[in-house]
Image: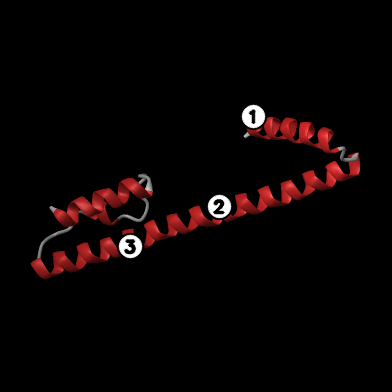
Amino acid sequence: LTTLASSTAQQLEEVWDEVGYTPEERASQLSDLLVQFRDLCDNKIAEEKGVAETFRQTIADSKSEIIETSEALRTHVDSVLLRENTGQSLTDELATLEATLEG
């Protein structure tokens, strides 16, 4: 990110030199750029939180399905599968549950 910011600033300075922007105009342009970047970052964070929430919901649904299936089959479910915090990433936890449901 630091390299990108430095490169962008250098390129903007070159363009602004060519255009003839005043220091005030440059400051305004940078301020606008920072607001846009902050908005982009906020949107990306919200998007990724949504992804994590989708994983959590899918995990909860999978655990419910495992419980319902085991009750229907009158079999025992390994309690490790149903723990809330397994220490795994959400991706790994979902993969484990999906493998259990498939197998």
Q: Is residue 101 left or right of residue 15?
A: left
Colour scheme of this structure image? Answer: secondary structure
Label 2–label 3 contact, CB within 8 A: no
> Tag 3 or tag 2, which sits nearer the N-term?
2
Give the residue pinned by disc 1: 3
Q: Is residue 102 left or right of residue 28?
A: left
In front: label 3 or label 1: 1
> Tag 2 or tag 1, which sits nearer the N-term?
1
**Residue count near mark 1 (Cα–Cα under 10 Å), binned few <14, some 14–19, many ≥20:** few
Furthest-front residue in this view: 18
Residue at image x 64%, y 33%? 4
| Image x and y of residue 95, in percent | 27, 49
**As shown in the figure, which amino acid type bears the numbered disc 2?**
Ile
The relative height of residue 99 versus residue 62 in the rendered view (above or below) is above
| Image x and y of residue 26, in percent | 84, 41
Q: Nearer the viewer, residue 21 or 5?
A: 21
**Residue count near mark 3 (Cα–Cα under 10 Å), binned few <14, some 14–19, many ≥20:** some
Q: Nearer the viewer, residue 16 or 91?
A: 16
What whole-number distance in Å separates the C-alpha atoms at marks 1 and 2? 21 Å
Give the residue pinned by disc 3: 60
Residue at image x 26%, y 66%? 64
Which disc number belongs to residue 45?
Answer: 2
**As shown in the figure, which amino acid type bears the numbered disc 3?**
Ala
